[in-house]
Image (cartoon, rainbow, N blue to C red):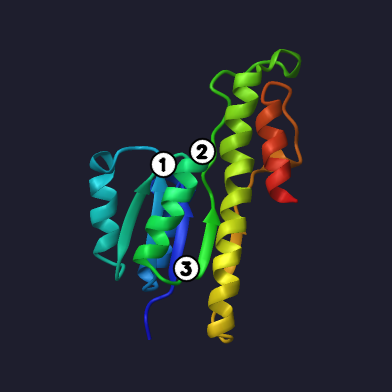
Amino acid sequence: MSAKVAFITGGTRGIGLGIAECLAKKGWSLALNGMRPASSISEVLDGLQQQSPDVIYVQGNIGDEKDRNRMFSEITDHFPTVNVLINNAGVAPAVRLDLLETTLESYERVMDINLKGPFFLSQAFANHMISAKASDPEGFYSIINISSISATIASVNRGEYCLSKAGMSM
């Protein structure tokens, strides 16, 4: 039996890396995403590769449609079946402004990465998982969204962030 596969956005640091380390210890294969060049996370990847059967890194911005499509293709070409998508990547506003001063640029950046990206990744991987489930009815498939306490406790100087996390929690 082949290892289960998880795709973790924002999987090379913080909560995403913690999830990746736990899954690697359990024998999962991993596809990890982040914005940094692979050369800057080689130690992270080396550490995970010592425990996981297979680890790939797909650099890209999940808020960008072309990057999402490319990452989906790279991942599903390498791993014909992806069992779990973990939507973990997220950004805070570059500058914390009062809700009444939030810029369109900040709003769009935060919403693209924190909400639009996970929505369309979930759509792509859900369709992928439905197809896989048809040929393997006993298989395990799941989509997990990581949110924040900011989904329910608002902050007047991070309105776009709170709104994006509330959307992720729905």
Disc 1 target residue = 60
Disc 3 target residue = 82
Identified by mark 1, the residue type is Gly
Residue 25, located in which quarter of the rendered image?
A: bottom left
Horizontal and vertical percent position of residue 154: 75, 32
Label 1: element kind? loop
- Left or right: residue 161 versus residue 58 is right
Q: Between marks 1 and 2, how big is the CA–CA gap?
A: 8 Å
The residue drawn where x is 62% and y is 28% is 108
Whether the residues at callouts 1 and 2 have beta carbons within 8 Å, the answer is yes
Label 2: element kind? loop
The residue drawn where x is 36% and y is 50% is 58
Identified by mark 3, the residue type is Val
- Left or right: residue 125 versus residue 7 is right
**Is the residue marked by circle 2 packed among few (<14), some (14-19), or many (20+) residues within 10 Å?**
some
- Left or right: residue 114 versus residue 34 is right
Whether the residues at callouts 1 and 3 have beta carbons within 8 Å, the answer is no
Please name whichever residue, 20 or 75, is drawn nearer the observer in this view of the structure.
Answer: 75
Horizontal and vertical percent position of residue 62: 50, 43
Residue 122, located in which quarter of the rendered image?
A: bottom right
Where 138 sits versus 154, above or below? below
Horizontal and vertical percent position of residue 72: 46, 55
Disc 2 target residue = 64
